[in-house]
Image (cartoon, helix red, strand yellow):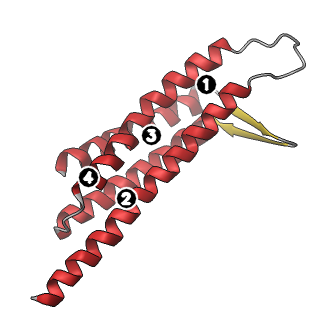
Amino acid sequence: MKRITLYFWLISFFFFLLSFYFFIFKNTLIDVNIYDTYYVILNSHLSLLLALVYTATSIIYTLISIKKIALISWLTKTHSIISITIVPLFFIGYFILNNNVESEFPLFDDSQNLKLFLIGMGILFLLTQFILIINIVFSTSISLKLKARN
């Protein structure tokens, strides 16, 4: 459990550094067009949001370790593996798809694959965080039932 917590702390520190880098040196953004709505997100804001999510996750794992709550092993492994591997997959996919996008008409943005990739990775990341919530709820209910029997 301590190693998983350490990984989440390292990833959150990485995202904090990345958000400062984007804020100070590069003012780049991600734009997503869904039907008639156009969302513009600065990379520094996205990195800061991810840093906060990973920090909250590492705080939760730290508190669980302190309280000595036994989590369901396969749910913890699933959450950790997906949450940790989604970071490099996101950046690799983003840079590959962002560099391959060339519009045939300059006024028409045909980067639909990049947008679908970003939305898909975001949805996968959010669903993965629900695995942690489900794990905590089931683990605490199981531990409360065991304490009630004794």
Q: Can you tell which of label 3 and label 4 is closer to the viewer? A: 4
Q: What element carries label 2?
A: helix
> Where is 144 relative to 14, above or below?
below
Specify the label residue 16 is tagged with: 3
Specify the label residue 74 is tagged with: 4
First in sequence: mark 3 vs mark 1: 3
First in sequence: mark 2 vs mark 4: 4
CA–CA distance in space, label 2 to label 4: 11 Å
Specify the label residue 132 is tagged with: 2
| Relative side of 145 to 113, left or right | left
| Relative side of 111 to 134, left or right | right
Q: What element carries label 4?
A: helix
Specify the label residue 26 is tagged with: 1
What x and y, as percent, mark residue 5? 25, 49
Identity, as a three-letter code, of the amino acid under mark 2: Leu
Identity, as a three-letter code, of the amino acid under mark 4: Trp
Contact between labelled residues 1 and 3, with CB atoms less than 8 Å apart: no
Could you classify mark 1 by the number of other residues whose Cα lies within 10 Å: few (under 14), some (14-19), or many (20 or more)? Answer: few
First in sequence: mark 2 vs mark 1: 1
What x and y, as percent, mark residue 144? 22, 82
> Where is 89 relative to 105, above or below?
below
> Where is 146 relative to 104, above or below?
below
